[in-house]
């Protein structure tokens, strides 16, 4: 999973939980999924997702070179693998996750 490091750091910053701890290893998939969906907008995973999905030209003009690199890498990696329907579904899913935060 390409974003595993982002998930690890996001869980640590949001919940103070180490994914490598014994307690975490006992966590059910349902609990993990709930915590993942509940990550705040200021976590590394959420910030990266926001960069990847940004399409507002005014916002993009103010991106740093690092942000452009993150966005371009994601877009080039996913462009040839997804249909427009897949993209619309993923965007809707992300919107719903962020709306519920």
Image (cartoon, rainbow, N blue to C red):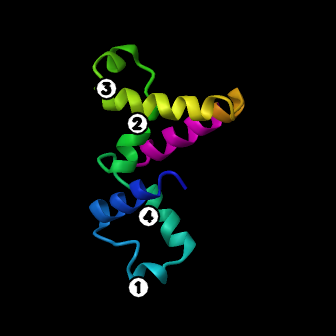
Residue at point 51%, 35% (across, down) = 74
Secondary structure under tag 3 reads: helix
Q: Is residue 52 left or right of residue 42?
A: right
Q: Residues within 10 Å of mark 4 (few under 14, many from 20)?
A: some
Q: Which residues are magenta?
A: 88-101
Q: Which residue is mark 3?
A: 65
* Contact check, label 4 and label 2, Cβ < 8 Å: no
Q: Which residue is mark 2?
A: 50
Residue at point 54%, 77% (across, down) = 28
Q: Residues within 10 Å of mark 1 (few under 14, many from 20)?
A: few
Residue 25 versus residue 85: which sits nearer the camera? 25
Chain-order first, disc 1 or disc 2: 1
Q: How far separated are the C-alphas under marks 3 and 2?
A: 15 Å
* Contact check, label 1 and label 3, Cβ < 8 Å: no
Of tags 1 and 2, the one toward the viewer is: 1
Residue 94 place in picture, x, y as percent: 51, 41
Residue at point 27%, 60% (across, down) = 13
Q: Residues within 10 Å of mark 2 (few under 14, many from 20)?
A: some
Q: How far separated are the C-alphas under marks 1 and 2?
A: 31 Å
Secondary structure under tag 4 reads: helix
39 falls in the magenta region: no
Residue 36 place in picture, x, y as percent: 45, 59
The quarter in which the N terminus is drawn is: bottom right
Q: Which residue is mark 1?
A: 22
Residue at point 30%, 60% (across, down) = 14
Secondary structure under tag 1 reads: helix
89 falls in the magenta region: yes
- For residue 35, which numbered disc appears in the image? 4
């Amino acid at each position: 999973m390409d974003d595993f490091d982002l998930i690890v750091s996001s869980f640590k910053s949001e919940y103070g939980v180490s994914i490598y701890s014994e307690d975490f290893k006992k966590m059910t998939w349902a609990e993990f999924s709930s915590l993942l969906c509940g990550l705040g907008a200021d976590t590394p995973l959420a910030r990266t997702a926001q960069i990847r999905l940004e399409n507002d030209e005014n916002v993009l003009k103010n991106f740093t070179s690092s942000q452009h690199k993150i966005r371009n890498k994601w877009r080039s990696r996913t462009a040839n693998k997804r249909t427009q329907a897949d993209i619309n579904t993923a965007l809707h899913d992300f919107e719903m996750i962020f709306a519920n935060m």
